[in-house]
Image: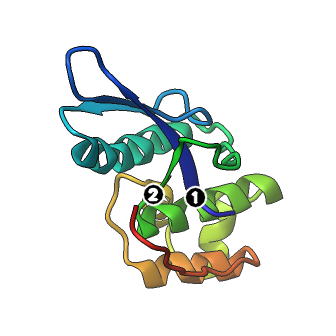
Amino acid sequence: MRYLYPCVLTPEEEGGFFVAFPDVPGALTSSINRAEALTLAEDALGAALAGYVHERWDIPTPSPVAKGQVLIAVPPVVAAKLALYTAMREQGITNVMLAARVGLSESVVRRLLNPDHRSHISRIEKALRAVGRSLVVGDRNAA
């Protein structure tokens, strides 16, 4: 899955912009200008999706971008962690099961799944391979 979500920027009466994500209700932010609002939107999206992981909820699938919406991506390491988390949920793999597959402790796997924890991408890639997934990196024009 691509962790690229559409957001809506709404001009506020007193100036600035309010940002909301239709697919991720808890991801909200605002700022005094559009550029800063978009920068903060990435943080808000990442934090909200981290909350889904902490609550053990399914990660919402991004909807197609509609007219007037802007696409926001989560940071690459967060996207890799979300992909690992989603694959494990889909396959019914526990932290202990994954730890045994990759030769790590359960506490290390817990940190690999935590979007708020810094992890080396190579460890996440190894864990993704252990659940039959691979990481694909792409680029796009900046908004």
Q: In the figure, residue 128 lies in which quadrant?
A: bottom right
Which mark, by number, is residue 123? none
Residue 41 shows in this picture? yes
- Residue 103 seen in the figure: no
Across and down, in percent, residue 74 comes to 45, 57
In three-dimensional space, the C-alpha distance between marks 2 and 1, rounded to whole angstroms, equals 6 Å
Q: Is residue 87 above or below residue 7?
A: below
Judging depth in this view, the residue of 63 and 124 nearest the camera is 63
Is 1 displayed left or right of 10 in the figure?
Answer: right
- Graded by Cα atoms within 10 Å as few (under 14), some (14 to 19) or many (20 or more), the crowding at tag 2 reads many
Residue 114 vs residue 108, the one in the foreground: 114
Q: Are marks 2 and 1 in contact (CB under 8 Å)?
A: yes
Q: Earlier in the sequence, mark 2 or mark 1?
A: 1
Q: State the residue at coordinates (37%, 70%).
A: 119
Q: Residue at x 54, y 81 (%)?
A: 137
Q: Amino acid at mark 1?
A: Tyr
Label 2 residue SS: loop
For mark 2, what is the residue? Answer: 74
Q: Position of residue 133 (x, y in %)?
A: 71, 77
* The one of 18 and 138 positioned closer to us in this rendering: 18
Residue shown at the point (32%, 65%) measured from the top left: 118
Numbered label attached to residue 3: 1
Instruction: Where is residue 142? Give x, y as percent.
Output: 39, 68
What amino acid is found at the position of numbered circle 2 in the picture?
Val
Residue 16 in percent (x, y) is at 23, 29
Q: Secondary structure at mark 1?
A: loop
User: Which one is nearer the viewer's eye here, 46 or 40?
Assistant: 40
- Label 1 Cα crowd, 10 Å radius (few <14 / some 14-19 / many 20+): many
Task: Say which residue appears at 60% left-offset and 79% top-offset.
Answer: 135
